[in-house]
Image: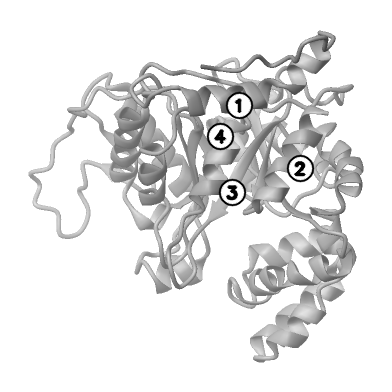
Amino acid sequence: MLKPLYKSGERFSVASTINKLPLLQSKILHACEPPILSPRYCRIRLAISAPGPKNRSRKGNAMKLGLDIGYSGARLDLPMEAISRAEALGFDSIWTAESYGSDVFSPLAFIAARTSRIRLCSGIAQLAARTPANCAMIAQTIDALAGAGRVAVGLGVSGPQIVEGWYGQPWGKPSARLRDYVAIMRRIWQREGPVSHAGSEISLPYEGPGASGLGKPLKSILHGNPDIPIYLGTSTPVNIRLTGEIADGWLSMHLTPDTLAAKLDLLDEGLARRADSRTIDTLEIVGNVRVIVTDDVESALASAKATIALYVGGMGAQGKNFHKNAMVERGYGAAAERIQELFLAGRKDEALAAVPDEYVDEGALIGPVERIAERFRRWRDSRFTLLRLGNPDLAAIEAIARIANG
């Protein structure tokens, strides 16, 4: 039996009730039997909102929170305690990733079986890892198992080192490939007829070298969810415009509230080409932020530098590294060049030390709860509609939930 939210004599108010919503949801999740909480019947949809004046560039729903668990290291160990707590506190979504080890979708299927309503999002699924038909099949299968409406597909091209070195696929023309890939996935889900597509990078049926000539357009046997959202993880001007033109949301890279505005103009240019009614106000814009609750800000900043040094220094070729380019765009060109130079020379500790504290701090929420709460306002009042929290521990999850509701 659920205990009352208010103690005897405790004064009722709307504000105090809102602050107790995460507690109420937690009580419900722990009190109900599993059959009651089946995804098909239990549609609890509490999104963490951040009260306060909204930035004029963002309209509609309040900012949502997502838990970004990334991809595995040498061992795959999903943080199920953190995932369960995030769901109980009303987080909107869980985000997985892939590079060249664990894949992006298998963890989502596992998480779906152990959660009830939190959205299951790939961020990102690499295009070269699977055909668009296979990606559509996986997404609609997990969505059907979890309960329709829980899956969102984030797509990205990755970089040429992974595309050609790991998957053995040609780098080709990423923008054209993205356009073909999204079009094919949507047609599969919509089931308006057998799927055919004559694209510059991908065509169905296949009629290229080695074709038998026997391929024919097919229609999905599974009647899946036709409205699975597609987000694109893009960083170049051409592909950001394409995101505005064909996607339901944008997965930004290495941005802060202060560096978002120029990218919004590119999204607007793409949105102007659409045939539907979507505008910048209805486009999901996802940001990334690392959250570390600590009294030792200096040590926490240092701990965050290893990932930055890896991506800026070595996650890409010397002449084609999107992460390095993003650091340059944020005004840290000299540091970016030095980090890459040191990393590629095998001097990884020096590359890590070359990452500026300011660069880390601008894109993170690090420090005591009071400092995080103050700095959170910048993100809350920005045009980001959803924040992916970078693999935080339980203390950080609890703290950011209180701050977002406070």
Q: Which residue is mark 1?
A: 273
Percent x, y of residue 127 = 42, 52
Q: Which residue is mark 4?
A: 87
User: Is residue 370 positioned above or below 345 on the image?
Assistant: above
* Near-viewer residue (101 or 314): 101
Gap in angstroms between the C-alphas marked 2 and 4: 14 Å
Gap in angstroms between the C-alphas marked 4 and 3: 13 Å
User: Is residue 308 positioned above or below 403 on the image?
Assistant: below
Task: Give the colour scheme of this rendering.
Answer: one colour
Gap in angstroms between the C-alphas marked 4 and 1: 37 Å
Q: Which residue is mark 3?
A: 68
Q: Quadrant of the C terminus?
A: top right
Gap in angstroms between the C-alphas marked 1 and 3: 31 Å
> At numbered mark 3, what does the secondary structure look like: helix, strand or loop?
strand
Q: Which residue is mark 2?
A: 399
* Type of the residue with mark 4: Glu
Quarter of the image holding residue 190? Answer: top left
